[in-house]
Image (cartoon, rainbow, N blue to C red):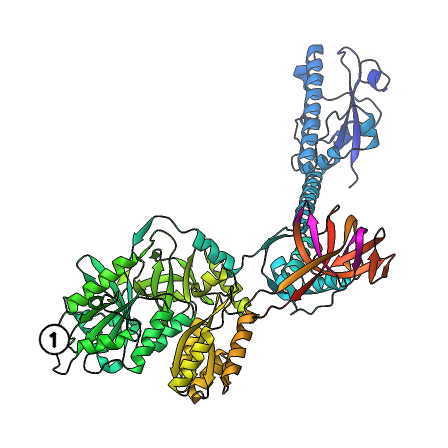
Amino acid sequence: MENKKIKLTISGKPNKSFKKFDSSKSQGKKTVIIDNQKTKNPNKGGFNKSFGSKTPSQNFKRGVSTKPIFSPKTSTTTSDFERRKLAEQRATKRLKGDLDNKEKKTKLGTKKRELKLTVSRALSDEIEIRERSLASVKRARQKELKNSNKEENKENLKPIKRDIDIPEAITVRELANRMAEQSSNVIKFLFGMGVTVTINQTLAADTAEYLVKEFGHNPIREEKAEEIIKKIKESRSENLKNRPPIITVMGHVDHGKTSVLDVLRSANVVSGEFGGITQHIGAYQIENQTNKLTFIDTPGHAAFTEMRARGSKLTDIVVLVVAADDGVKPQTVESIKHAKAANVPIVVAINKCDLPEADPQKIKNQLLEHELIAEDLSGETLMVEISAKTKLNLDKLVEAIILQAEILDLKTDFESKATGIVLESKIDIGRGPVATIIITTGTLKKGDFFVSGLRWGKIRAIINDKGESINEATPSTPVEILGINGAAKAGDDFIVLDSEKEAKTLSANRAQESKDGKNPLTFATQESAFTDKSAEELNLIIKSDVHGSSEAIKNAISQIKHDEVKPKIILSDIGMITETDVTLAKASKAVLIAFNVKPSKEAKKLAENEKIKISSFNIIYEVLDFIKQEMSGLLTPDVKETITGTAQIQEIFKVSGAGKVAGSKVTEGEITSISEVRIIRDGSIIYTGKVGTLFREKNQVKQVSNGQECGITVKDYMDFQKNDTIEAFNTTSTERSI
């Protein structure tokens, strides 16, 4: 139903009729528009009650003044005025109530309309301050989050500068992995320099260092195994203390060597417990009053010479057991020679003196032939007459060993990192790899990181010779260790390092050196690693068919003399070459000569495996010529150097296919494409190598003369700087002979 509007005009003057105020132009009029809407309560506001039950449309005609029907009691002027005033108030109140209800129903829509800025509202003064809508706040937050994500992505995309460890040799794959770069990118870069490589190609340290710098990383040169060991050696404390001596018992198996060992061991163990580890590690300690003695149980000469073969000067004293009823045997003589080759003092134990046929004086006389002179014969060799069976003079034997140790004045550093020698190694079910070592220097502690040969690990447990678990081991102590990552080799060195990283680095370097054909550096060879490689003596082992030939060869060799090198005969004997001779040759780095004899099948096989050359001769002067030739090889050749030209680096630039090129000007002489060159910076030689490529006006040339400008590349070197001097030279080497 269509809503009807009624126009009600009420005058403020009580004495005038409604007709007078019909016109909208009347003075003082008030107009109220009332919507005739059907509501649940038609009398709301009280307006219709004044006109009875009829609707306003029945009581008023549109545009015509009609006299309302009032109660007779309120017919006065004042009453009429009050009624009109009251009606006006009620109508106004009703209007406001309708507007309030409308606003409540359209609250959200009204707010949105009010917040919406139109042109008319912007030009009017209706809105002074505009509040931000929820949508605008949400959009601002999204924009802020997006910008922050962009900044984070930019930061994440920034290249990370890493510290890259560079060994002496590294493959392209490994270098790329360390730089966190794709191998293809490294290969492409090298290809751009004119170097074609594969992913498994080995790069030199200088080339790898240059690549690392070009990719924006920091190269760190890894130390060589020799350098690490040298530092360890130089870091030794000067606070030295006496250490127990290490004794090796040698001799013929039938002369009572094992019996002497058993008696010495049982005499020390008061409780009767030998310890299960003694038999396994072959080494144990005994205590004599305040002195400790470490014995190594070596069944024969092979173990002893194998230790020497690896350069280990492990043994301090050799106890030579000789049976008084049997005398000096060939094996006894070999033991004497092994001990002398190791420069180890000998204490002679003349065993079986309790037997009726024993003749100790005969033994002493026989030993005179081998330069072992007893004290009662005005010599320096300690000899004790004992009996392992009756325990005769065993205490005197121990005293003699202690006295010899006091003469040697054995001292070492107890405070430094531990070093030692591996006696043997095995894989134990349940415990894993187990290594038996003897500590030579420093104190070994549980938790130490170490390297042994090509292996490394962390000490998980230390077990002494009695089978007890201990927390630390001092010098000259034989122990078993757990925690190595593989089986070590007998004779390998044992070195404790500061960290796991150092242990892994040293192990990796040794492995790389081994791949390159170099033997892993052991503690045994560290002395030779830090000294002049040219030997002063040529060690010789000579085996001949008869004693006369042996003597003739020895006399002829003694006549060969030179100021810088001289021959030294370690062993000269008769008979075929045996395995012992081969191991001795390896231990002493001696030349093995066979004169009219052949090696045994076992010795030949061992020599092939150990790469020991056996030189066979049947004419004596051929032997002498060969020895002179070997001695000549030890002489330093005469090297003459001639400087052929110098150039000054003026500019550095890159050339596709050549890499970094030093733009230089030849100031003296000439430089050729085959010249050896050295880079001089601030008066110091920083690199020596060979010319890679020589450019002249973008063309490769073979020679550049004085005053000409050229481009020079040097093999395996690119770290050029302005004002560096490139000096070209030639060397001529002349071999020397005796």
Magenta residue check for 64: no
Give the number of marks: 1
Asked where in the image residue 399 lies, by quadrant, the reply is bottom left
Q: Secondary structure at mark 1?
A: loop
Label 1, residues with CA under 10 Å away: few <14, some 14-19, many ≥20:
few
Magenta residue check for 681: yes
Residue drawn at x 72%, y 51% is 720
Magenta residues?
660-684
Give the dominant element type of the magenta stretch: helix, strand or loop: strand
Left or right of 569, for residue 77 = right
Asked where in the image residue 655 lies, by quadrant, the reply is bottom right
Mark yes or no: residue 172 visible: no
Residue 249, given in percent of the width and then of the height, sits at 27, 72
593 to 203, vertically: above or below: below
Residue 589, given in percent of the width and then of the height, sits at 46, 72
653 to 616, vertically: above or below: above
Left or right of 151, for residue 123 = right
Residue drawn at x 43%, y 70% is 310
- The one nearer the camera, 555 or 440, is 555
Residue drawn at x 81%, y 25% is 124
Point out the image quarter for the C terminus. bottom right
Mark yes or no: residue 537 visible: yes
Q: Which residue is mark 1?
A: 390
Residue type indicated by callout 1: Thr
- The one nearer the camera, 121 or 130, is 130
Point out the image quarter for the N terminus. top right
- The one nearer the camera, 552 or 614, is 552
731 to 105, vertically: above or below: below
Residue 471, given in percent of the width and then of the height, sits at 30, 57
Residue 225, given in percent of the width and then of the height, sits at 51, 61
